[in-house]
Amino acid sequence: MQRSPDIQTFLTQILQEDIGRGDITSMAIIPDNAQLHAHVVARAPLMLSGIHLAAMLLAMVDDTLEMKSEAADGVFMPAGTSIMEIKGSARSILMVERTLLNVLQHLSGIATLTAQYVAAIDGLPVRIVDTRKTAPGLRELQKYAVRCGGGFNHRIGLDDGVLIKDNHIAVVGNIEGAVARARAAAPQLIKIEVECDTLDQVREAVAAKADMILLDNMDIPTLKAAVALCKASHIASEASGGITLENVRAVAETGVDSIAIGALTHSAPAVDIALDSFIPTREAA
């Protein structure tokens, strides 16, 4: 099974979604030889992600369009900064505008939110990681945007690692049995992580010799105690659940090794990017 669509196929689909049978507005009112000189501008401070996709979209719509940019994914862009310059057919630029901006705004929004979380724990030996809470069909792109923001990827899919969650434990009956079954079935290089929401469960997971323990929705005192149990047995710990920009540093200060945040991909707001400063360079006679 292919994990996600080919990027070229994905871009073709999103262009078709917006353009359909054609940009009837531009075709009706813009002369076919009209030219534009446009800038894609960051209207707010942001961490850039998706510029390579923007370049691909431009070439797919009209390979005569000229794009110039010194910006790169994973680079902070102050408000008012030009992300890219585009020259060429006015009809082509206007036709691709919305799709191009949607991609940049969405991916840069994820990168920007991730960068804010990373900045909030600056100086602490903790990783900010994403989750599988992604938009269908966009997982690889969204997780790429997390990396642009300085975060790290958790599992891309279910085949990347064993994560024994509450429902698995409910079916098997206990953590010890679930870990034993996973250990017997999984390849030796696959890590086994167990989700725990109480200290008793953490003790069970430690006794079962899990490789990593996910500490779910714990308050700070409980989290500190859970991390201490993990460290005493040299087991990696990960905090998740209810993490915000306001409390992420307090969570990081408990000593956890990583902090998983679903909001990076499922709730990141789009950043303000616009196609500005249109300068007609040649009108129809």
Image: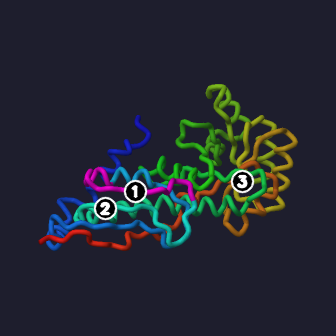
Distance in Å between CA atoms under marks 1 and 2: 9 Å
* Nearer to us in this view, 20 or 80: 80
Q: Nearer the viewer, residue 114 or 204?
A: 114
Q: Position of residue 52 (x, y in %)?
A: 43, 51
> Do tag 1 and tag 2 residues touch (Cβ < 8 Å)?
yes
Amino acid at dot 3: Ala
Image x and y of residue 4, in percent: 42, 43
Query: What is the magenta range?
Result: 58-75
Residue reaching furthest left?
285
- Say which label, 2 or 3, has the lower sequence index: 2
Name which residue lies at 20% across and 65% down: 23
Which residue is identified by label 3?
239
User: What amino acid is labelled 1 in the image?
Assistant: Lys
Return the disc, 1 or 2, that comes first in the chain's sequence. Answer: 1
Nearer the observer: mark 3 or 1; the answer is 1
Q: Secondary structure at mark 2?
A: strand
Is residue 52 shown above or below 116? above
Q: Which residue corresponds to mark 2? A: 87
Q: CA separation, marks 3 and 1? A: 42 Å
- Relative vertical location of residue 188 with respect to residue 93 in this rendering, above or below: above
Would you call the spot at circle 1 few (<14 residues within 10 Å), some (14-19), or many (20 or more)?
A: few
Which of discs 2 and 3 lies nearer the camera? The answer is 2
- Between marks 2 and 3, how big is the CA–CA gap? 48 Å
Numbered label attached to residue 68? 1
Quadrant of the rendering where the N terminus is positioned: top left
